[in-house]
Image (cartoon, rainbow, N blue to C red):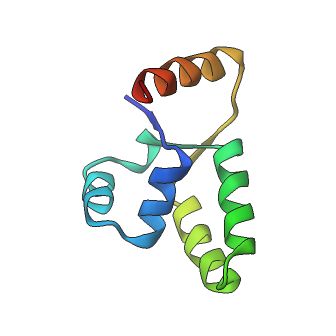
Amino acid sequence: MAYPLDTTIQIAAIKGHPAVVECRRSLEAPQLLLSSPVLGALETGGRQSAWPERNRERLEALVNQLEPISLDRAVAQAYGRGRAELEQ
């Protein structure tokens, strides 16, 4: 099974949140997916932060561990349904 990780989870991973770090350790790299929109949001946030160089290095280390994916309409629709259910 593959898991596309959202921006919030990626930020928690970059910051070393213990629960996220532990969960990531239990999964193999090919199972963890990174979409272009999430990467774009992380790039933007890192560049706008008070520590852009440090955050750039952390992001680079994280990105190197993940499988990049592109989104098509079916993926976007599934994401929208899942997120809507979680936000109810």
Q: Is residue 73 left or right of residue 5?
A: right
What percent of the width, then of the height, locates residue 62?
52, 64
Q: Residue, x 33% and y 66% (percent of image)?
A: 17
Task: Tell me how many marks there are.
Answer: 0
Considering every residue shown, the one lying at the far front of the view is 88
Q: Is residue 35 depicted above or below 55 in this figure?
A: above
Q: Is residue 23 depicted above or below 56 in this figure?
A: above
What percent of the width, then of the height, locates residue 51?
65, 85
**As rendered, which of 70 and 39 lies closer to the eye?**
39
Q: Residue, x 25% and y 58% (percent of image)?
A: 19
**As rendered, which of 47 and 34 lies closer to the eye?**
47
Q: For the N terminus, which image quadrant?
A: top left
What percent of the width, then of the height, locates residue 16?
37, 71
Q: Residue, x 44% and y 29% (percent of image)?
A: 87
**As rendered, which of 59 and 15 lies closer to the eye?**
15
Q: Is residue 1 depicted above or below 42 in this figure?
A: above
What percent of the width, then of the height, locates residue 14?
48, 68
Kindly indicate the quadrant of the structure image that contains residue 79: top right
Q: Is residue 70 depicted above or below 56 in this figure?
A: above
Kindly indicate the quadrant of the structure image that contains residue 37: top right
Q: For the C terminus, which image quadrant?
A: top left
Q: Residue, x 55% and y 75% (percent of image)?
A: 58
